[in-house]
Amino acid sequence: MSTSASAGIVEQTYFHRLAIATPDHQEFIDWFSHLLGTVTIDARYLQPHGIPFGLEQTPTQARESGADLNTIWLGTMPFVIFSADSPQSPIASFIEKFGTALHSVAWHVPDLWKADATLRRHGYRLTGYDIPGRHFFIHPADTSWMLIEISDTHFAQDPRDYDDVLPARPVDSIVKDAQFAWLTMAAQEPRASADNIATLFETSEVSGYPTDAGQEVIDLKVYDIITRFSKRDETSSERDHLHSMCFAVPDLADTCDRLRAAGIRITSQNDTSAWSEAADTHGLLMQWVSAASLPA
C-alpha cells in the first residue's frame, strides 16, 4: 500500500543492480546460486541507444573501483558481484575492512550528464567517475551513507524487458522459489534517511510489509525496489550502513528447515519472518519472509 510519493530531482528508469563485494567472486557466485537458485545470462552492457562498448572496455571490469565483476540474477533482480583486481584497489580496501558485504546500489538514468549537472546544482558531491564505463557515485555522506552509483548503461539482455532470456533455476538450490523482497538500511534516523533518498529519486512510502516486534522502520519504494530504513542500535559505534537483504519464499517453515539442514542456523523465526545467522552465509545478514505476508 502506497501512502506518499516524491518525484525527486534525478530522473531514473529502473534499479540497475545491488553490488556485493567478496574476496572470490566465482566461489561466491557458486554458493549464492546453490543457496537461492540465481542464474547467469549475457553480462554485456550497452551504452545509450544500444551502442556496444569498444574492445578497450571490458564489461567484466570496473576500472575506477579496481574490481572484477559478474552479474547474476534472482528472477528479475540483478546482483553484481565484485572482487578486487589488485591489492591496491578501492574494492580490496573495502573487502579487507568488511569482508564479504553489501557494497552499493545503482540506478539507471536516461541521461548521465544531465543527472551529473542536476546533482551538482543541488550541492551533491560526486566521486568515482568512470567515463569509459559511464557511471559515477554520489558521495555517501550526502545520501545517509548509502553508496549510490548512477549509470546510463543497460544490460544487453534484461529479463525485465525480455521474457525468454532467463534459464531455468538450478533444481538443487537450498531455498526454493525465492524472490527479492527488500533491501534494509540501518539508520540512526530512519525518517531523515528516507526523506534524504526521496529528495533524490522517484519514491513512494509504502506500508503493510512485515516487521519484527518493536522494529521502527520506514519502507520506501525507490522507483522499482523496496528499501527499508530500520532504526539501528544507538549503542553501536557503527554509522548508518547497508544492513541486510530480505527474500520472500512461498513456504517459510520449509525454507527454515532447508536452511538448517544445510548448516545455516536460524536465529529467530515466527509465522511471517525469520533471520539466518550471518556467519553461516558468508557474513551476509539475510531475512526470510512468507510471500503471503507481503502486500498485494
Image (spheres, grey):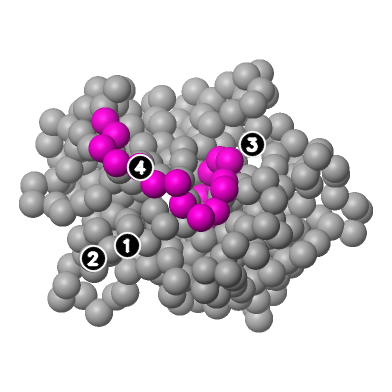
Q: Quadrant of residue 296?
A: top left
Whole-number angstrom distance, CA of label 1 to CA of label 3: 33 Å
Query: The disc labelled 1 sits on which kind of residue?
Result: Ser
- Residues marked 1 and 3 touching at CB (< 8 Å): no
Query: The disc labelled 3 sits on which kind of residue?
Result: Thr
- Residues marked 2 and 1 touching at CB (< 8 Å): yes
Q: Which label number is shown at residue 189? A: 2
For image coordinates 64% across by 63% down, the residue present is: 116
Q: Quadrant of residue 293?
A: top left
Whole-number angstrom distance, CA of label 4 to CA of label 2: 19 Å
Q: Which label number is shown at residue 40? A: 3
- Residues marked 3 and 4 touching at CB (< 8 Å): no
- Chain-order first, disc 2 or disc 3: 3
- Chain-order first, disc 4 or disc 2: 4
| 234 sits to left or right of 52 | left
Query: The disc labelled 2 sits on which kind of residue?
Result: Glu
Residue that carries the numbered disc 1 in the rendered image = 193
